[in-house]
Image (cartoon, rainbow, N blue to C red):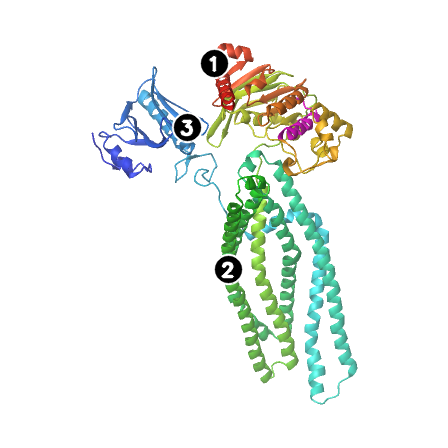
Amino acid sequence: MTTSIAAITNSSLGLPEAWKQELSLQLVQDEMVISAVETDLDSKLHFKRGLIVLTNQRVLSKSSEQTEWQSWDYGQGLQMRHHDHAGVGHLELLNQANLLAHWRFTLGQNLLVIRLMDAFNDQIHEHLTGKPVEKAEQNVCPSCKAILEQDQEECPVCTKVIHTPPSTWTLFRLWRFARPYKISLIIGFTLMFLGTLAHMIPRYLTKPLTDKVLIPYQSGEHVETSLAVMYIGGLLGAAILAWLLSWGKTYILALVSERIGADLRTTTYEHLLKLSLEYFGSKRTGDLMSRIGSESDRICVYLSLHLLDFATDVLMFLMTAVFLLQINVKLALVTLLPLPLIAWAIHMVRDRLRTGFEKIDRVWGEVTNVLADTIPGVRVVKAFAQEKREATRFREANKHNLAVNDKLNKVWSLFSPIVTFLTDLGILVVWAFGIWQVAHTEITVGELVATIALISNFYGRIDSMSRIVSATQKTASAAKRIFDILDHVSSVPEPQNPVKINEVKGQIELREVGFRYGNRAVNRNVNLNIQPGEMIGLVGHSGSGKSTLVNLICRFYDVAEGAILLDGVDIRSFAVADYRSNIGLVLQEPFLFFGTIADNIAYGKPNATREEIIASARAAHAHEFILRLPQGYDSMVGERGQGLSGGERQRISIARALLIDPRILIMDEATSSVDSETEKEIQKALDNLVKGRTTIAIAHRLSTLHKADRLVVLDRGEVVEVGSHDDLMAKQGAYFKLYEAQARNAAALAVGGE
């Protein structure tokens, strides 16, 4: 019954050695392992290791609780069935009559189980037909062997986040924001060119001033005073002209850079709002705030200061080179000797700076994430006396940020002095060569002095230009993080030719609707037809897919399978904003913005009159408590509704939904987090809100859904029962069990309370 362990080792299954050794004892001659998955839960959902193995002849299985291996030969009627529920995956092996085996696992194993099922189906097909399954060539991850989608280059299992070092070329993408200001940019750069030219005049006048005024005067020769005045006047005039031109170009280009930064922030924020909820689910609030705030500000500073200085340095550098060549070619060529070494130093440090600054940005995001977590949640922090813990958390994040900066500063602190040393060395070489040329009468003292003045400026510009490397890499990193947002495409796209919504009747139809979070199936094969004005209650265990179904109807996500229709038209055919303007949403945890009560009620209809706002508040049974506030409807609401009770916040959110007069109403656990007395008030408000509208309600307390026309019972993402409360109770099926279980819990709590 034994075979070579090579049959297992060569299969690259990545199994622990203990399993390999044990499995090798079970394989018969010529039996090869096709696929295997290690399960990690037992029947009681405790963490226990087990193994499912497919060979070319049978299915093998063993758990850590069992002493013997189980085996099932391939045959007619043998099948595998897979589903997942509430974070636990289930795999069943059945024949035509019985359930043969049942395995449970966490969803981290889900992809591997799906692959194992595909291999199982292939083996069954080959066993029954005698022919192997013909399959198109598939891309497979070399690490985890997960099957990749077509044209998918990165494995989502192995690589949750790919940090690509930013490229300096990313900065050129900012041109789309600069294009509207090209006239101002042309004027600004023209003034820069003229200003740089004016800065060069004093250095060029040094030569005649030395040769025609200073040296003759020192030698006792007569020098015309007017000649000296003319040169000094030229120096003064050039300085004034350079100052005026510099002021003009700085002012114009600073205005342009501020507008580019403002447009960048606005465009990024507007694009962010267009992205689906799926994007925000994988991002931290502090990180997104940092990108739109500090990163765009860094780009603005770079454009208005660093880039402007760099452009001036480049112009000054080129003009200085021209003047040097005009004065003395040999001396000009000697000046260029340090340039290759400086270029090499810049090249060596550039990549380290680029990756270093990108890492600094990510680490700084960790710091802002702590702030974004704790400041809005400061009440919870204080309630659980976790101030020290959060302070330690911030201190650690700040310490990490400091360590990353220190590491990069070691590179930068070494680079900058090297460039300065090379430029100083270059000036010494020019002095030495220039003195030799004066001694051999190849140049005059005035030419040497003018050359030294120009060279000092020349090397000063090289030193300044080298420092732009740091600012450029920081800005490239910032630009990459912003363009990461702008390049992200919403998973809820706008249609190219949207269907116009005229009058909404409110009929909603779900056809074979399915949805997955990653590799986890949440809803599947959901069919439901909701008539205009009908109230539907969604019930089921936690994790049964109720809220996900509501999110799909609101089109916060798009269905993975099937379609959702409004009045017979696929909702993906409508413009997203037009479609959602017909939906009123009342959430379990209502969100209120910082502002007045009136502003919060009118959020969905900003141009609403005070009379309309009050009428909505009356219908929501909120008018009385609002009038008891110090400034009534003008009372300020704290951030996230602080200062109001849960019931008061909920009634304001109901008033907000009433004001837009939606044809479709979605209520997600609207009364689950309030006491019974407050629930009665909210229920009165909800009765007003429901009238004449197609309503879909999720309720934690099943007793609150008695007024629903139909109840839809969900289990493991599928619709298992539909009917009225009385009909479903009479069936004594899934709804009956839910209702009875909730009634027993309520009775037990009542007895405990007594």
**As shown in the figure, which amino acid type bears the numbered disc 2?**
Val
Q: Quadrant of the N terminus?
A: top left
Residue under pointer 2:
349
Query: Can residue 84 be seen?
Result: yes
Magenta-highlighted residues: 646-664
Of residues 217 and 39, the one drawn nearer to the viewer in this rendering? 39
Residue under pointer 1:
733
Lower sequence index among marks 3 and 2: 3
Q: Residue 387: where, in percent of width, then height? A: 54, 45
Q: Residue 344: where, in percent of width, then height? A: 50, 63
Cα separation, mark 3 vs mark 1, equals 24 Å
Counting other residues with Cα less than 10 Å from the Cα at mark 1, is it few (<14), some (14-19), or many (20 or more)?
Answer: few
Residue 605 is one of the magenta-drawn residues: no
Give the prevailing secondary structure in the magenta stretch: helix
Cα separation, mark 2 vs mark 1, equals 71 Å
**As shown in the figure, which amino acid type bears the numbered disc 1?**
Gly
* Residue found at the far bottom of this picture: 220
Residue at x-position 36% and y-position 24%? 121
Closer to the eye: label 3 or 2:
3
Closer to the eye: label 2 or 1:
1
Lower sequence index among marks 3 and 1: 3
